[in-house]
Amino acid sequence: MPCSLRELIVKVLSILETVDVRELVGILGVSVNDVVNSVSGLITMEGDTVKLNEAGIKEASGINCEVEAYGRLYEYYRAKPRSLERDVAIAEYGYRYAEYLNFPKDVSKEVLEVCLRLARFGFGSNVAELARKYGVRAFIVGLRAGDYCSAIDGLSYAVRKADPLGLMPFIGQAMSINKELIKNCIINYVGLMLHVGDGFISRNYFREVLRFIDDGLRTLSNVVDEVTCYLRVRLLNTKAQALTGIGNYEEAISDLNKSLDTLNKCAMDEITRRRAALEIMDRLGVVNYMTGNYAEASRYFLSVLNESVRLGEESFAASSNHNYVKSTILSNVGCTDYSRYLESMSGWSLYDSLRYYSSINDNANLSKVKLLIAVLLIGVGKFDETFKVINDGYGGEVHRFLKELLELLLGKRDFVNTDYVSMRLTMLGNFVNQLIQLFKLSSDKSLGEVINRELHPVIYEILTCRLPKLLLLL
């Protein structure tokens, strides 16, 4: 049975809450007098706006006119010129209208297009709530309307701007779609799995990452063009990152090598390929470094350094120079060739890294480079110059320990402090102080000559070479 005008007005007002009178009559297709006469005693008017009073709200709860009310709202807004306000209204009221009617094809198609447009706008404008809300809504409408590709696209926008944990029911639904139904947009589906994996990576849910990335890799059976090549490389890189997170370094290295091999076989712009390879080689260096294979790590970092300088990639040049020098001196016994590592290599030096990180105010990496330079300078006996590098208040406890060690070597103190939060620094401080105690025995006639001859050079090497090197691992 059709709703009466009174019922329709009350239900529309319960949905809109507060609305301009002229807009209300436009929605209903009646006059202001019709509205006032029909709902007298149920509304409150303030200037040009109208809303339900308590009696109206109570009456609205007993009225079952949702289909007609949402239908009127949907038709009213869809007739307006396109705007953000219009699109949001269609996405809200049109969606509810379609929901009540069990998603008829014509209404669903328009609501789906609008929801996708809003999700895309939210993603591009970095409005996370817009991308999440209407991306999910596009997914729901797309599934109900049988437009699975649009559904996947909508969920992709949502996943890239929201915590994937909160979207798991929808992600699970997407994974259960028969792949035959999305064969024309299989790349979009694989991209969704990649975005889900990336989302979980940022939250350190590494095993969940593997679940979605492996599904993407299984689905992407053929690499036939630049797009599918790019996707496979990204999937393998993300998988390697997750494997690294759970300590499976051997498999991570294997997947990174597969990624590099895929990249080298793909038909794509050469500069794009070389820049993508930089990232993979850098990760290979990092994973090898994490396993303690410093020699292999240094080999990759040197390749990254050489290529990044050729490509003009300053961020990679700055990091790879630091990582190459650090992994190289950790792989070598003793402290030979320290002066060489302070010089330019392939047109880039540690001092260039200092300047780069200073220019972008990256204090974390700035402190790392300063520490490495300080270790090298101590190793070549340039104590005063070391002070200039680290005496700026940054670097925390490690830099404070190094400063006290320098003062000890310069004869400005007799011991180093051991009151550190880091237990390892406290242990190193106690070790240094015990070594210094040995020198005090040199005043003993029977021991002095042997100590000066046998222990002094050994202790000096420990304090200026081996011990500072340990600070790079803290």
Image: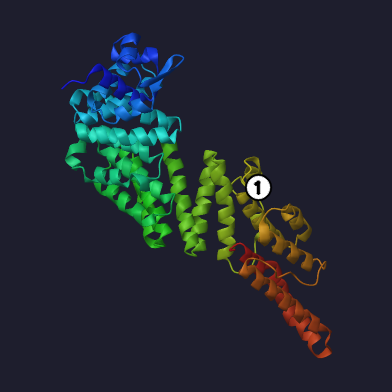
Q: Residue furthest bottom?
A: 446
Q: Is residue 277 above or below residue 421?
A: above
354 vs 117: above or below: below
Q: Position of residue 184 (x, y in %)?
A: 22, 34
In which quadrant will I find the N terminus? top left
Residue 203 vs residue 198, the one in the foreground: 203
Q: Which residue is at the far left?
A: 1
Percent x, y for residue 288? 47, 60
- Mark 1, other Cα within 10 Å: few <14 / some 14–19 / many ≥20: many
Q: Quadrant of residue 390?
A: bottom right
Residue 187: x and y in percent read 28, 38
**Which one is in front, 274 or 318?**
318
Regarding residue 232, the answer to whether it shows in the image is yes
444 horizontally vs 300: left or right: right
Q: Which residue is mark 1?
A: 354
The residue under the point 25% across, 32% down is 141
Q: For the point 65% across and 73% down, which residue is it? A: 427
Q: Position of residue 297 (x, y in %)?
A: 50, 58
Find numbered disc 1 in the image and state the secondary structure of the residue it sits on: helix
Q: Which image quadrant: the C terminus? A: bottom right
Task: Identify which residue is drawn at 26% across, 36% down.
Answer: 140
Q: How many badges with numbers are in the image? A: 1
Residue shown at the point (20%, 37%) measured from the top left: 183
Q: Find residue 332 and report its image quarter.
A: bottom right
- 83 sits to left or right of 345: left
Q: Nearer the viewer, residue 47 or 338?
A: 47
Q: Amino acid at mark 1?
A: Leu
* Colour style of the rendered protein structure: rainbow
> Can residue 220 be seen in the rendering of this structure?
no
